[in-house]
Image (tube, grey):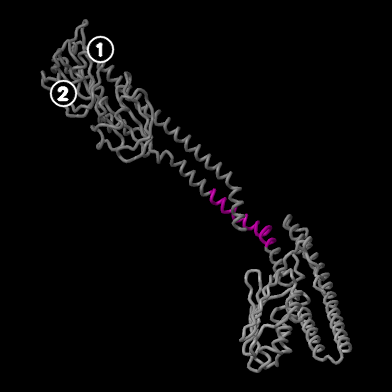
Amino acid sequence: MRRRLAAVTLTALLPAIGMLAYNEFKVREERHDEVHEQAIRASQQVALEIETMLEGVRGLLIATAAIPSVTDRDMRHCHDALSEVSGKLGAFVGNILVLDNGGKLICDTLNWQVGTDFSDRPYIRSAFTSDDVVIGGYTIARISNQAVLPIAFRMTREGETVGVIATGLRLDWLQKRITERDVPQGGSVTVADRDGVIIARHPKPEAFVGTAIPDPYRYLVTARTSGSLEVMSQDGTVRILGYQPITAHNPLYVSFGISKTEALAPVNRATVTGILLMLGGTFLAFIAASLVGRRFILDPIHNIVEVVTRWREGDQSARTEMEGRLGELGLVGAAVDGLLDEIEVRRKASAAAEEKRRLMARELSHRVKNTLSVIQAIVRQTFRGQDQQIISFQHRVAALAGGYDALLSEDWNNASIREVAERVMQPLRPAEDQSISLSGPHLLLPPDIAVALSLILHELGTNALKYGSLSVQEGRLSVSWREEADRLSLTWRERGGPPVTAPAREGFGSRLIRLAFPAAYDPEVTSNFAPEGLEFTISFRTTPVTADPDTAIPETADAG
């Protein structure tokens, strides 16, 4: 019952658990989408910031290229003009170079050797053919030996190319700006050129700057549109990555990663809290169900079971006394009390009727015995002088009375086969005589079988006493019985008596043995008159066979 109460409680909690699970799923799904949007917006902000920086450098180069001393390639005044511009910019850019049409150095801010050839630089060659500012890739500056992002712009005068002005965005300055950003714990920012080489990274720039983005994610650099995805970063952190690919307006690849663990930490904490609250509520629900169930269900049921058990063990006064209490179970208890009261009334009525039946049975037995005594007296008066026939008749009547006595001892229900045999055998031997043995299991016989068997055993015993094994002192008699399936077999075996011969004609005793047994029990009788002693077997069903009313023979058919 406790398990059933627990199952009912759990069933009642299932909708609440289902709602919590659904809310948990929706919160996680919404948080997941929110983090993806947040990563994309953050990458857009970084890309916009870098684009603003590069636009400033572009304006710087265009403005510097308009200075006459620079355009005229006046070596004496060019250096001064470049140094003045560089001084105003501080650490924003590196060395500013002015190159001729062949890509050789005319002047710079560091007074590098005039004529140094830069024509081998890809961004210089691209600048000669572009009408806009050209931004190169990750480069180690030849003069300052610093990592820079080179930027070049073709100078013209009256439509003719007169050279190239170039500088480099210092990557250490860019790295500082990236590091100073408000990056959440576990997050990352990556900036790469069009070749996928990382030019700025947070965290661990020393491990990643100058290296290439892994091949599985290289396609993001030139993807058609911005987006987000979940990746396992090179530092082993699972991040939700928002990225901005290189476009005409965005010359650098930018990605902003948010740690999935950190992003979902508030949700996870809320989940743990919700689970703990749910477990606590479930535990309290089970405790309440146990207490309430014990008070209003288990205790009343135990009370009903205990009353029924006590009543079955003989306490006829046991009652639940639950009428008017405990709701439906109280009605069940009251119904049980009513049933027990009714059974008690019927039991008393049945006991009174049984007592009357016993008195009537004993009175009937007494009257039957009196009748048999009168019959014996009439026989003695009628057949005076025929003592032997009178004695035989009296013995048969006594055997019949013995069968009735056996039935009377069992209240006329069923008689023990052993008791029937002992009552019949008792007049044939003294109490200390061991010449007769009885063996077989304890079996009960119906009244009609008990009476018939008494007469048959009496006839067999009388014959054994006159002519068989009981007529001599060394003779022995055994009576055994066994039950097989729905039939009972009884065997009468005599040994040690005079030699046995088959009778020449059937006497009254033989006819009695053959006809005394009710035909409804399908009796089968066999007699073996062996020289060493008689062997008699009777087999019959333990339950009567229902006869066909149209073919049944009346019991009085053998009366003549």
> Which residue is disc 1 drawn over?
131
Does the magenta stretch mainly form a helix, a strand or a loop?
helix
What segment carries the magenta color? 277-301
The N terminus sits in image quarter = bottom right
Residue 483: which quarter of the image? Answer: bottom right
Residue occupying image coordinates x 23% and y 32%: 210
Q: Which mark is residue 229?
A: none
Which element carries disc 1, helix, strand or loop? loop
Task: Please provide percent x and percent y for residue 421.
Answer: 70, 82
Residue occupying image coordinates x 52% and y 46%: 274
> Which residue is disc 2 drawn over?
110
Task: Please provide percent x and percent y for residue 238.
Answer: 36, 39
Task: Please provide percent x and percent y for residue 541.
Answer: 69, 70
* 107 left or right, relative to 420: left
Kindly identify the amino acid type of the residue bearing the numbered disc 1. Asp
Mark nearer the viewer, 1 or 2:
1
* 211 left or right, relative to 374: left
